[in-house]
Structures are given as structure tokens and as C-alpha cells.
């Protein structure tokens, strides 16, 4: 049976371990109406990341974008005044990308195609194109390999409905309760109360609030859904050697991994419901690959930024990443293990559920803050921070560590 | 499916046979014409034997509810809330799933038997759908 990395010589996939670092992070404010173009948001995040690193546009020779960014590499080269870009790349689909985007930067640096790479994600996700909206009325839907023709005619049209079907099944198989999902929403909301840049800063949430909120696609309620956000976030990656002489202490990239699952089904979302099981995510395969590459296991992770498009997505990933057994995610989160002081504090900036939805990229920034000791909900002495982007259909992840 | 206006692309090269079979009142699942493996979601290539010989085969129009969601937040004008989306697992071939739509908020549970129906779309074409049966119903 083939495993990830099975074709590699011993040590080959660990070559990049601790060899590159994130040396700058930058973000805009997160809002519902930025009043700025996608390009302006991207430039502001990139400028902030450069300033954080103590670098200028002339130091950047690589750019990695997400396939759902509207801003192109060339747009930023021109806007920032980058004199000589020698590498550019993009990764998708969407929220799966951010750790893999950093992985592209690592690959470019280690192969000599670039020295210092800007990785960015921008979206006017509330005032502009809103994800999770259904196709237009009267549209002829599907075909062309989308497989939407098997789903949209039945009113199955949004990611939230997919995850609702998964949540219902998880409840059936393992006895997961609404209060378990609520514990995830509350943990993220509490972290946001300490983060002035979080969209839900100043808006605490109780379990009664959570349970009383209107259902959207049962069993999921309003606060099981992430926010719609206007904003941008960027990081700068360079070699560990160059990182030593910059403004901020380097945050090492212990390892990065992308992985697909066996029998993943085609397309980017709805066909995942045809997988043999729908209570696991590709996180299982990404975890296996990433932990092996990093030489670490879940017991070595001090804090985690878990991709949280929905609460159920977090619950399944906590199981799949090995923080608890499959099926035990509900009791695990309800017992406080994801809170500060618990076994694995998560989403310490508030996550997509309460900080903002920058499609996985703000999780990387918060991971960097934890290793620097700069988080507004700092885990004391954090040495290793896991960042996941393993919703569906495939996934990616990374571990950030102290130098 | 009152108010229903979303029409599927029914002539896709890989998936059109599903909708063609529905016009004859059949639920069809794609198989490999050489080795017989199920190819679902439908695609021409069989990775098991390497053939490009897909065949549509009518299957028993029965199954059970594998999961479901009651949609209460209106996201599309064609689908009045509340409505219930069924994730149906066919009785055969094993493991093959399809989607169903039930208006409103019916009594439903995982494992409940379902049977195919073929409601007409506004253009007169038929779409496979699934109706909930009583637990003790003889699914045939």
C-alpha cells in the first residue's frame, strides 16, 4: 500500500525542516465593508508585513497567491514596486491553500528560485463576492466536471449545508451534541474578546445565546458559521539564515505538508458526500504527512490554529489531527481542552468564527504571534504551533516553531 | 418541489446518462462495461481495469437516509424554507449515494427507508428524487 512519501529516500521529505522562517506578518483591519479595493487591501497587508520584517519591496523576489485572490502577482509587483520578481505561484482551492502557499515559498527558497517570498490573501468577502451564496435563479446548473447537477437541483447549494450533513452524521455515529459545537463557538468568541482586531471583539457569547440563535441548516445554527469578512493578510518567508538578522525573532517553519485522501471524489465540495465516510476530513492524511516531516506528534503541539469555516469542521479536525480519538471530539471540547490552560488551546485570535475569515491566512499570522509571544491570548512558552487548513476536498498544514 | 426552477445540465458527456434514464423512470448508476466496477460519481475511465467503457445500469430505486439537514435559511429563491435535503445511500450498489429534496420539515431519521420518485421539472423533464417511507414499509 502506498503511503505519502513512499517514493522518497530516507530523510528526503525532511530536508526543509527548520530551514525557512516567517519573518514578517501584516494584516488590514477586518470588517464588513472595507470601502477599499482588493488591490488596496493586498497592498496594505503586504506593506505591513514588510514593515514588520524591516524589509522593503526591493527585498521581495517571490510571490505566492491563492487561486481565489482577485489580485494577481503582477498587480502587486507593480503596486509595491518590486524590481525583479523571479518566482510566482498560486495554490488552491481556496481555504485549503494558506499553509501550502507557505510551502510553495519554502520550495522556491530551497531550490534557489527566490530568496524572500511574499505570501498573501485578500478578499472583500462581505461587501464584495460573498462565498456560500447559491447560484442564480433559473440557471442551468452543473456539467463540465462540476457534478453540481447532482446537488443543486435538490437545494443543496452551500458549504454550510454540506457540513450540516456531516454534523448530523457525526451526531448519529458518536452522540455529538449541539452543546459540543457550541463549546467551539464559545472558545473562539472568548479569544476574540482579547483581540481588538477581531470582528467579534466586544461581543461576548454565552451558551444560551448560542443555543437560542436561529438555525441555518440544522443541526447547524448561526454561530456555527464563520464570519464574512473584508480584509487581507500577508506573511514574508525567507531562509532561516537570512531570518537571523531581521527586525523580529524568526519563526521557523518546522515542516509543511499537503495531502489528499484515498478515494477523494472529484470536484471541490459537494461530491465529498460520496466518500466512504463523512465524519473524517483529509486532515488524517495531512496530519500523517506533516507529523512525519516535522518529527513531531500531537503531544508536541502547544497551541493550534484550526481551520474553522464551521464549528463541526474544528471538531472533526481535532479528532483527525490526533488530539483526541475519533468520535470523542464532543466531550473533548466540552471539557475545556481547547481553552487557554487546556490541552490544546485553539484559534487564539478568535479564528474564522470570531476574528475574521481571511480564508485560512489569518490563522498563520496568529500562529506566528504565538511563537513570538505576541498573541493577545498568549500560551506561555509556546514552542510549536500547528496551523491547519484541512476542511475539504484535500488539505494542507504546517507547524511553526521557535528558533 | 414547488417553485422549483433550478435545472440540471442533463447532457454532460460523463453524467448525462443519469438524467436520460430518469426520463424512463429509472435510477441509473454508472459502471465499468469491462470489469463491472461502480463508477460514481460518474466518469468514463475505470482505474480498476483501465477501460474507457462506461455503462449506465438501472438499479433498485430504493435506499435509506444516510444523513439529512433541514435548511431554514433561505439561500436560493427557488427553494422555499424550510426544506429537507436527504443524503440517500442506495440499497445497491453498496455505498452509492444520491441527493433528495423534501419540502418542509418531515419526520426523518438516519436509516429511514426511501424510494425514488420522478417529479417533473417546469420544462417537462423528470428528475430522480426520493420519498420517505415508513420504517416498516416494504421497500420494493
Image (cartoon, coloured by chain):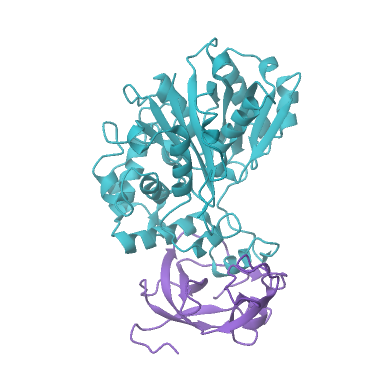
Chain colours: A cyan, B purple
Q: Nearer the viewer, residue A400 or A307?
A: A400
Q: In which quadrant of the rendered view does residue B42 lie? A: bottom right
Image coordinates for residue A157, horizontal then vertical, percent: 55, 60
Image coordinates for residue B117, horizontal then vertical, percent: 53, 83
Q: In which quadrant of the rendered view does residue A52 lie? A: top right
Indicate whether A18 appears above or below A129.
above
Image coordinates for residue B5, horizontal then vertical, percent: 63, 71
**Which residue sits at x=54%, y=29%?**
A15
Residue A361 visible in the shown view: no
Q: On the picture, is A219 further left or further right than A250?
A: left
Q: On the picture, is B16 further left or further right than A356?
A: right
Image coordinates for residue A62, horizontal then vertical, percent: 68, 26
Q: How many marks?
A: 0
Q: Check the image and name the residue furthest to the left.
A: A335
Residue B29 visible in the shown view: yes
Q: On the picture, is A29 further left or further right than A60?
A: left
**Which residue sits at x=33%, y=26%?**
A379
**Which residue sits at x=55%, y=56%?**
A269
Q: Nearer the viewer, residue B87 or A122?
A: B87
Q: Nearer the viewer, residue B73 or A183?
A: A183
Indicate whether A44 appears above or below A300.
above
- Image quarter (top left, top right, bottom left or bottom right) of the C terminus of chain B: bottom left
- Image quarter (top left, top right, bottom left or bottom right) of the N terminus of chain B: bottom right
Indicate whether A322 appears above or below B75.
above
Amino acid at each position: 500500500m502506498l503511503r505519502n512519501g513512499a517514493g522518497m529516500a530516507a530523510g528526503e521529505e525532511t530536508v526543509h525542516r527548520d530551514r525557512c522562517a516567517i519573518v514578517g506578518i501584516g494584516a488590514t483591519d477586518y470588517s464588513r465593508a472595507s470601502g477599499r479595493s482588493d488591490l488596496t487591501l493586498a497592498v496594505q497587508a503586504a506593506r505591513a508585513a514588510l514593515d514588520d520584517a524591516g524589509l522593503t519591496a526591493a527585498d521581495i523576489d517571490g510571490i505566492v497567491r491563492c487561486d481565489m485572490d482577485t489580485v494577481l502577482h503582477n498587480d502587486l509587483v507593480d503596486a509595491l514596486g518590486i524590481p525583479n520578481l523571479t518566482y510566482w505561484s498560486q495554490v488552491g482551492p481556496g481555504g485549503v491553500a494558506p499553509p501550502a502557499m507557505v510551502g510553495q515559498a519554502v520550495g522556491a527558497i530551497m531550490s534557489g528560485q527566490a530568496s524572500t517570498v511574499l505570501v498573501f490573501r485578500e478578499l472583500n468577502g462581505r461587501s464584495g463576492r460573498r462565498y456560500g451564496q447559491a447560484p442564480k435563479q433559473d440557471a442551468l446548473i452543473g456539467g463540465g466536471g462540476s457534478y453540481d447537477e447532482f446537488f443543486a437541483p435538490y437545494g443543496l447549494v452551500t458549504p454550510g449545508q454540506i457540513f450540516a450533513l456531516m454534523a448530523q452524521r457525526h451526531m448519529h455515529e458518536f452522540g455529538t451534541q449541539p452543546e459540543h459545537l457550541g463549546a467551539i463557538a464559545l472558545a473562539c468568541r472568548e479569544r476574540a474578546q482579547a483581540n481588538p482586531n477581531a470582528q467579534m471583539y466586544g461581543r461576548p457569547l454565552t451558551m444560551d445565546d448560542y443555543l437560542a440563535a436561529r438555525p441555518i441548516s440544522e443541526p447547524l445554527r448561526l454561530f456555527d458559521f464563520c464570519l464574512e469578512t473584508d480584509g487581507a493578510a500577508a506573511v514574508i518567508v525567507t531562509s532561516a539564515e537570512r531570518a537571523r538578522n531581521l527586525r523580529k525573532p524568526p519563526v521557523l517553519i518546522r515542516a509543511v505538508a499537503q495531502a489528499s485522501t484515498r478515494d477523494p471524489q472529484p470536484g471541490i465540495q459537494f461530491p465529498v458526500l460520496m466518500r466512504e465516510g463523512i465524519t473524517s476530513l483529509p486532515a488524517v492524511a495531512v496530519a500523517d504527512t506533516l507529523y512525519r516531516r516535522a518529527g513531531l506528534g500531537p503531544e508536541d503541539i502547544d497551541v493550534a490554529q484550526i481551520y474553522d469555516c464551521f464549528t463541526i469542521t474544528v471538531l472533526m479536525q481535532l479528532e483527525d489531527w490526533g488530539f483526541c480519538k475519533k468520535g470523542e471530539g464532543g466531550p473533548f471540547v466540552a471539557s475545556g481542552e481547547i481553552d487557554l490552560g487546556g490541552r490544546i488551546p485553539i484559534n487564539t485570535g478568535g479564528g474564522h468564527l470570531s476574528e475574521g475569515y481571511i480564508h485560512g491566512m489569518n490563522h498563520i499570522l496568529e500562529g506566528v504571534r504565538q511563537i513570538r509571544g505576541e498573541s493577545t491570548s498568549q500560551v506561555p512558552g509556546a514552542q510549536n504551533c500547528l496551523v491547519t487548513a484541512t476542511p475539504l476536498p484535500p488539505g494542507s498544514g504546517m507547524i511553526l516553531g521557535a528558533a | 418541489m414547488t417553485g422549483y426552477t433550478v435545472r440540471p445540465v442533463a447532457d454532460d458527456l460523463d453524467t448525462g446518462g443519469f438524467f436520460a434514464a430518469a426520463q424512463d423512470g429509472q435510477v441509473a448508476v454508472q459502471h465499468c462495461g469491462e470489469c463491472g466496477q461502480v463508477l460514481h460519481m460518474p466518469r468514463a475511465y475505470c482505474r480498476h481495469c483501465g477501460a474507457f467503457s462506461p455503462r449506465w445500469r438501472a438499479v433498485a430505486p430504493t435506499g435509506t437516509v444516510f444523513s439529512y439537514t433541514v435548511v431554514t435559511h433561505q439561500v436560493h429563491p427557488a427553494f422555499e424554507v424550510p426544506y429537507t435535503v436527504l443524503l440517500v445511500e442506495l440499497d445497491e450498489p453498496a455505498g452509492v449515494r444520491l441527493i433528495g429534496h423534501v419540502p418542509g420539515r418531515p419526520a426523518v431519521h438516519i436509516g429511514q427507508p426511501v424510494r425514488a420518485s420522478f417529479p417533473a421539472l417546469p420544462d417537462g423533464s423528470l428528475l430522480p428524487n426520493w420519498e420517505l417511507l415508513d420504517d416498516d414499509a416494504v421497500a420494493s
